[in-house]
Image (cartoon, grey):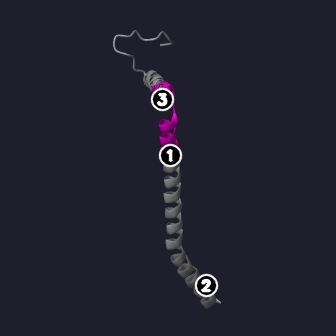
Amino acid sequence: MREAIDQGAAQARAAAERAVPKIKAAVSDAAYGTSYGATFAAVFSYTLITELAPEILKAGGRAGAEAGKKAAEDLAARCKGETKAGAAPEPGIA
């Protein structure tokens, strides 16, 4: 009985050792495919839009991006407790 258990364990170990490289390869392929697909979609969409969009849409997109960046930076600074140079701190509970 013990010999059968040892033999089964050895077979299971050998099967696992053969499976690990296949699993690693599958995970690697999936990660590559996901990264490739996401990047392709983002760049393709951006390039197509910038090539086909009228200039007024491009200007509006740039202005919106700048305004969004500034708003996010201001919010992050407030969350960190920073204030703009020369600006009075906002009133609040001390």
Q: Sequence-wise, which precedes: disc 3 or disc 2?
A: 2
**Quadrant that contains the N terminus:** bottom right
Q: Where does the image place residue 41, in percent across and percent down from the top left?
A: 53, 47
Q: Sequence-wise, which precedes: disc 1 or disc 3?
A: 1
Report the residue at 50% width, 11% height from top. Answer: 92
Boundaries of the magenta span: 45-62
CA separation, marks 2 and 1?
Answer: 53 Å
Vertical side of 37 occupied by 28: above or below? below
Instruction: Please state which amino acid type lies under the numbered disc 2.
Output: Gly
Neighbor class of circle 1 (other Cα within 10 Å; few <14, some 14-19, many 20+) is: few
Report the residue at 45% width, 27% height from top. Answer: 62
CA separation, marks 1 and 3?
Answer: 16 Å
Neighbor class of circle 3 (other Cα within 10 Å; few <14, some 14-19, many 20+) is: some
Asked if the residues shown at circle 2 and circle 1 are in contact, with their CB atoms under 8 angstroms apart, the answer is no
Q: Which residue is mark 3?
A: 58
Vertical side of 92 occupied by 7: above or below? below
Instruction: Please state which amino acid type lies under the numbered disc 1.
Output: Phe
Q: Which residue is mark 1?
A: 44
Residue placed most toward the observer, 93 or 59:
59
Secondary structure beneath label 3: helix
Residue placed most toward the observer, 89 or 76:
76
Q: Which residue is mark 2?
A: 8
Secondary structure beneath label 1: helix
Instruction: Please state which amino acid type lies under the numbered disc 3.
Output: Lys
Residue placed most toward the observer, 3 or 63:
63
Secondary structure beneath label 2: helix
Neighbor class of circle 2 (other Cα within 10 Å; few <14, some 14-19, many 20+) is: few
Image depth: mark 3 or mark 2 in front = 3
